[in-house]
Image: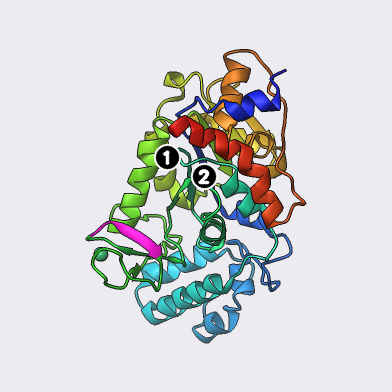
Amino acid sequence: MLKVEEQTNDTSMARPHVVILGAGASAAAFPKGDKNGNRLPVMDNLVEVLQLAAELDKHGIEHKGRNFEGIYSKLYKNGHYSDLVAEIEMRVREYFSSLMLPEYPTLYDHLVLSLRPKDLIATFNWDPFLYDACSRNHAKVELPKVVYLHGNVRIGYCIKDMRKGLIDMRCSRCGNFFKPSKLLFPIRQKNYTADLYINSEWNSLKKILRHAYILTIFGYGAPDSDVEAMSLLRQGWGNPEQRNLEEVEVIDIKDEDQLISVWSAFIHTHHYEITGDFYNSWIARYPRRTCEAMWNLLMELQRPEDYRIPRDLDFPDLWRWYEPLITAERRETH
Ligand SMILES: [Zn+2]
């Protein structure tokens, strides 16, 4: 058994851990809604949660029992509903912008604190939780890189200077206000390369994914409407036959057979794990040392001892808990 102290002092793995977040991650983080009890919509109940029914009724659009993806795609393609489409997009932006993290540490805080600057989180979510969690922790702890694959309500960018930041801030280079990132809506042909900002986010992901040692897919259902996302992810990860030492971890409450069939293109033989609970994942069991722990288990045949994220600590104590790990990382880089 590899002791915690040895793990703390071992920062030898330079290869990244890549984490992909979907709507299921935010649903798992906030089962009772955000700070103010606002619910986290998924495609199946977005019309209800955002109270879009009246607007749709006014235009005679059938919506009862239908998934938002289907409704939106139809309106978008029709061409006669551009005002309604614009109205829906505005309501979505407003709703997601208004969501707030509770004051105590949440799953999102635990997630960003438990990965290193070499690692990357790529989210499909429009909600602001990942951005806000980074924003309240980054002065204390060095955080992983983050990319927003469908745009995000908090993110603006300056394409000329390739900078991104909080939506109503100015670019530090040219001084112009950031342009709000586009939110990519559920249509079959998303055309990720058409928007310069979103294209650059995907390129960052693909570049890092190629060298990743662990890939964690958390609450991302890989919907049929997003074949393009799957094909880009596959390109980045490569052929599972060529990646025989890496591990794929799926955090999802769906049943195992279903998950394996969705992610089979990424999984090499038995190198995968599935858990329904983030707090049983590699990230939560071996915070900031996930790749070292995996290497020790698979290559050195040494089982690393768990040292789980303490879920009940408040911020100052939580940051203090991460200090020995971060001190060891700084020693390594100096
Ligand atoms: Zn600029």
Q: Horizontal and vertical percent for residue 84?
A: 43, 80
The magenta-colored residue range is 161-165
- The residue mark sitting in front, 1 or 2, is 2
Q: Label 2: how many residues lie within 10 Å, few (<14), some (14-19) or many (20+)?
A: many
| Residue 219 seen in render | no
The residue at 57%/63% (across/down) is: 67
Tell which circle, 1 or 2, labels the residue nearer the N-terminal end. 2
Q: Is residue 175 magenta?
A: no
Label of residue 20 in the image: 2
| Residue 39 seen in render | yes
Residue named by callout 1 = 233
Q: Horizontal and vertical percent for residue 194?
A: 28, 57
**Picture quadrant where residue 168 is located:** bottom left
Label of residue 30 in the image: none
Q: Nearer the viewer, residue 165 or 204?
A: 165
**Picture quadrant where residue 47 is located:** bottom right
Q: Horizontal and vertical percent for residue 35?
A: 68, 69
Secondary structure of the residue carrying tag 2 is: strand
What type of secondary structure mainly makes up the magenta span? strand
